[in-house]
Amino acid sequence: MTNDLTILERPVYGVSEAARLLGLRPDRARAWLDGYTRAGVRYPPVIRREPTGVDIVTWGEFVELGYLREYRRAGVPLQRLRPVVDELRDAFRTPYPLATARPYVYDKELVLEVQERHDLPAPIAIVVRSGQQVLLAEAARQFFRKVEFVPPNDGVALRIRPAGPASPVVLDPLVRFGRPVVSGVSTERLWELCDAGESIAQIASEYDLSEEDVRAGVAYEEQFRSLAA
């Protein structure tokens, strides 16, 4: 557990950079991390137990921000998730329950019980009942497919594939300071070389990558820059 927590507690990004990598507005990321005040009413954070105002985001917090991102258009305030997350923190004995595999793999029944106890609205549910089975809600399933947990059934999130499970692009807190990479080479560098006129074949040869991986890295960076703009 100590090594797991070391990864999840590793400082990786500032709030603005974390938001940029996830395609979020910085103010939304800050609200999920530290809460916000609107019309004189104070709304608590979803991710942190208490507001800290700290600008540095840990890897565990970043992964949980990525989870909440899947629900950003749910139409229900995500603060409704807070009591569920709080209870899962205690049940799983970790400050980052949504950055572990347990709620998505073998503890779905427990998650359902917690959801029902706190009357969690269906649009932001983590799991749903289908007949005799408890399945991941669609947004949770989409998130789960992008994350590599080690070990798979009860481990922690070690890396994210932001473009989907089939993409070679990964975010890894232990590689290039968590920036998007393909086999350790930053997608930014691949894009810069391509933009400067080098061919896909030349770049692939220079970095010992397949041409398919180079294309995927360049395409990801182009889309990332387009969304940021």
Image (cartoon, grey):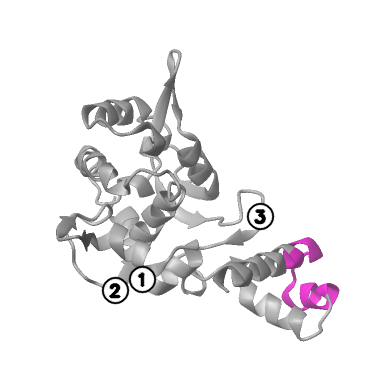
Q: Residue furthest top?
A: 132
How far across and down, in percent of the image, does residue 5 sit?
A: 30, 56
Residue drawn at x 31%, y 65% as measured from the top left = 30
Q: Quadrant of residue 225?
A: bottom right
Residue 143 on the magenta span: no
The numbered disc on residue 41 is none
> Label 3 belongs to which residue?
167
Q: Is residue 226 visible?
A: yes
> Residue 83, relative to residue 20: is it above or below?
above
Q: Is residue 174 visible?
A: no
Q: Quadrant of residue 49?
A: bottom left
153 vs 73, nearest the viewer: 73
How far across and down, in percent of the image, does residue 55 sit?
A: 29, 73
Between marks 3 and 1 in the image, the one whose residue lies nearer the viewer: 1
Crowdedness of circle 2 by 10 Å Cα count: few (<14), some, many (20+)? few
Q: Are marks 1 and 2 in contact (CB under 8 Å)?
A: yes
Q: Residue furthest front?
A: 39
Q: Is residue 48 left or right of residue 148?
A: left
Residue 206 on the magenta span: yes
Q: Secondary structure at mark 2?
A: loop
Q: How many numbered circles does the render carry? A: 3
